[in-house]
Image (cartoon, grey):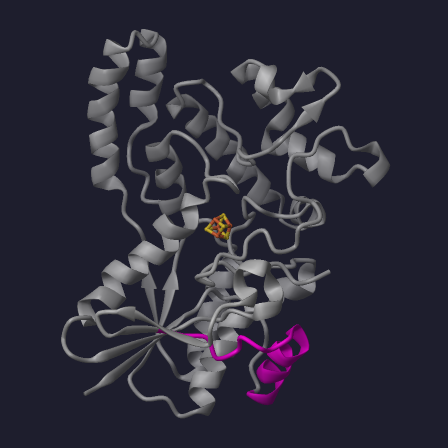
């Protein structure tokens, strides 16, 4: 029986350390896979190229494709929205924007007519887990071979991860393997050093996590750093908000969609869609990120929860503990 070793690589420190463990153990049948969300920083793409060259391990890039689902959504809007009596201008605006762009993150949001949120964090599944499963893991399953999915998860990242086993069977010959589960952050960087591999340079540029730029769960201080160092990322999200807003039946879509914004006027639940856009857009969130703690008017994001991104799958790099 052959064992296929699949390492999920995000460009972040933990998944890189996991790949380095696999290399140090002279693991055979090794495949590194990167799920490209389309919302990554340019430096992460360059880092993956570097990682391939420095380790000699090719990294398979997978991307989700929402073309068919967008086609289905168009049909739904053309028929159901009209049947529901949605204003024709809203229907036409949505149809105008419901076109595949080829960017997985944007296409996902256009198809869903909204951005993901902490409570509805469909991005991890749709952009990372499913493309990896469909394009890499599932084709290897059911052949009688063993498939070991190496995940760069650490127990001290979150409650979600604290009690995970180092190895567990999923079924169909697939096993999850978490070799750095008991590691702390210094051990992760030590592994980079020991193997002569540089960490993603974004860590030395104020970023607590590497992955989507920004992540929907990004901390207040991270957003401030992103706006300062990478204003083009904010410009891109601003453009995406305008597009997804057009796709939205409510006429509003903010990147920090799960925000519990509070405003002197009251909760956003009581506001119109346009009022929400005015106070909770990415531009407003950036302004808020510059405020001192005492001056906070909005609670747009999870400013203190460093583990908000820690899904049990380890597909999104979690924030470095403060
Ligand atoms: S990094 Fe954040 S925004 Fe990107 S897929 Fe993961 S949870 Fe979603």
Q: Residue at x 58, y 20 (%)?
A: 269
Say if 258 sits above or below 179 in the image. above
Along the line of sight, the residue nearer the viewer: 294 or 189: 294
Say if 79 sits above or below 195 in the image. above
Among the 4 quarters of the image, the one containing residue 101: top left
Along the line of sight, the residue nearer the viewer: 308 or 297: 308
Say if 168 sits above or below 215 in the image. below
Residue span colored magenta: 176-195
Q: Position of residue 312 (x, y in %)?
A: 47, 60
60 vs 210, left or right, is: left
Q: Position of residue 130 (x, y in %)?
A: 31, 55
Along the line of sight, the residue nearer the viewer: 156 or 237: 156
Q: Position of residue 145 (x, y in %)?
A: 19, 80
Say if 171 sits above or below 183 in the image. above
Is residue 259 among what the camera can see? yes
Q: Residue at x 59, y 60 (%)?
A: 158
Is residue 292 among what the camera can see? no
141 vs 305, left or right, is: left
Among the 4 quarters of the image, the one containing residue 97: top left
Where is the C terminus found, in terms of image quarters? bottom right
Q: Is residue 266 magenta?
A: no
Q: Residue at x 56, y 66 (%)?
A: 162
Q: Is residue 191 magenta?
A: yes
């Amino acid at each position: 029986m052959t064992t296929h070793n699949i390492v999920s690589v995000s460009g972040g420190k933990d998944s890189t350390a996991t790949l380095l463990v696999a290399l140090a153990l002279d693991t055979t049948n090794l495949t590194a896979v990167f799920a490209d969300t389309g919302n990554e920083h340019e430096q992460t793409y360059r880092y993956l190229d570097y990682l391939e060259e420095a380790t000699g391990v090719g990294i398979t890039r997978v991307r989700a494709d929402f073309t068919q689902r967008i086609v289905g959504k168009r049909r739904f809007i053309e028929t159901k929205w009209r049947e529901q009596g949605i204003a024709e201008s809203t229907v036409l605006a949505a149809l105008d924007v419901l076109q595949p762009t080829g960017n997985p993150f944007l296409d996902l949001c256009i198809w869903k007519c909204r951005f993901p949120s902490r409570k509805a964090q469909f991005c991890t599944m749709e952009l990372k887990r499913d493309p990896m499963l469909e394009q890499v893991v599932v084709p290897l399953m059911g052949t009688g071979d063993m498939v070991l999915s190496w995940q760069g998860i650490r127990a001290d990242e979150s409650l979600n991860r604290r009690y995970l086993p180092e190895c567990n069977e999923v079924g169909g010959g697939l096993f999850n393997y978490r070799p750095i589960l008991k590691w702390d952050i210094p051990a992760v960087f030590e592994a980079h050093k020991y193997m002569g591999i540089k960490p993603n340079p974004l860590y030395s540029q104020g970023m607590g996590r590497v992955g989507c730029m920004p992540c929907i769960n990004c901390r207040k201080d991270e957003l401030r750093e992103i706006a300062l160092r990478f204003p083009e990322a904010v410009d891109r999200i601003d453009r995406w908000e305008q597009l997804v807003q057009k796709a939205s039946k409510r006429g509003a879509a903010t990147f920090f969609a799960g925000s519990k914004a509070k405003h002197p006027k009251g909760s956003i639940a009581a506001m119109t869609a346009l009022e929400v856009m005015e106070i909770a857009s990415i531009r407003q969130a950036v302004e808020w990120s510059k405020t001192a703690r005492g001056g906070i008017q909005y609670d747009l994001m999870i400013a203190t929860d460093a583990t908000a991104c820690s899904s049990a799958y380890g597909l999104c790099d979690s924030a470095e503990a403060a």
